[in-house]
Amino acid sequence: MKPTDARSLHGHVVRELGTRIVAGDLKPGDVLPREDALAESMQVSRNALREALKVLSSKGLIEARPKIGTRVRAREFWNQLDADVLSWRCASMPTDDFVDKLVEMRELIEPAAAAAAAQRRTSADLSRIDAAYRKMEASRDAGEWATADLAFHNAILQATGNELMSSLFAVIESVFGMFFVLSAETAGDFKYSLPQHHKVLEAIRRNQPEAARKAMQAMIVDARSNLDKRRKTNGKKQR
């Protein structure tokens, strides 16, 4: 599921209201202003506003109640894996919280995916993983590295042969992208983890699931350690 296009009028309203809800500016139980007042304040037509409210309702963020109006729903009703909701949550979260939760999610998913890819990958799968690795190797800055890094991990999920795993990447792509950018910018040398990526690639090439699992796990642990060091350094500077 792709994020809502914020360039359209109703897309702009979806993003503005969604961000305010997820950030806590609009709290669960809060009732939105009347339709005409809200449309005027956001400088959009009532039709555009209605379309936006339908989208937010489908994401579980709001609900219309008779005699009450449209109110914000409790967090447990939100569609947490919706691409927009996930992106808004990550953007509004303190960086440390975002990193901790994302690293935990990576630890649960990616080592198993690497092992499955080592067992099931096709020659075409291997070519895609290898091509992404070569782009990482050739990257000239942290931005190019992060883009190639994202392609590398996507190719591994695709190589699992599990369409549910492949679909999962479509949901978390933007969040992984944010993580890889942060990780690259945090490292003194953004290519420092290239040897670890090579170990994962070679384990998959040689059809060695346990080696692929361990190499991926080591990569994630190292990324966590690298970010923790930067966190401690920043903490000392602020004292």
Image (cartoon, rainbow, N blue to C red):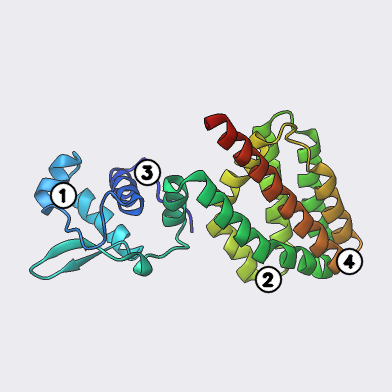
What residue does disc 4 label? 208
The residue lying furthest to the left in this view is: 67
What's the CA distance linking mark 3 and mark 2?
A: 31 Å
Residue toward you, 7 or 229: 229
Q: Is residue 181 at all visible to an observer of this figure?
A: no
When asked about the image quadrant of residue 149, the answer is top right
What's the CA distance linking mark 3 and mark 1?
A: 17 Å
Q: Closer to the observer: label 2 or label 4?
A: 4
> Where's residue 8, x and y in %?
33, 43
Disc 3 packing (10 Å; few <14; some 14–19; many ≥20): few
Q: Secondary structure at mark 2?
A: loop
Q: Tell me: residue 9, above or below residue 33.
A: above
The three-letter amino acid code for the residue at tag 2 is Asn
What residue does disc 3 label? 6
Residue toward you, 4 or 228: 228
**Left or right of 132, for residue 52:** left
Q: What residue is shown at x 19% (from left), y 51% (from top)?
A: 47
What's the CA distance linking mark 4 and mark 1?
A: 58 Å
> Where's residue 41, x and y in %?
16, 41
The earlier-in-sequence mark between 3 and 4 is: 3
Q: Closer to the observer: label 3 or label 4?
A: 4
What's the CA distance linking mark 3 and mark 4?
A: 44 Å
What residue does disc 1 label? 46
**Left or right of 178, for residue 39:** left
Q: Closer to the observer: label 4 or label 1?
A: 4
Q: What residue is shown at x 72% (from left), y 65% (from top)?
A: 113
Q: Secondary structure at mark 3?
A: loop
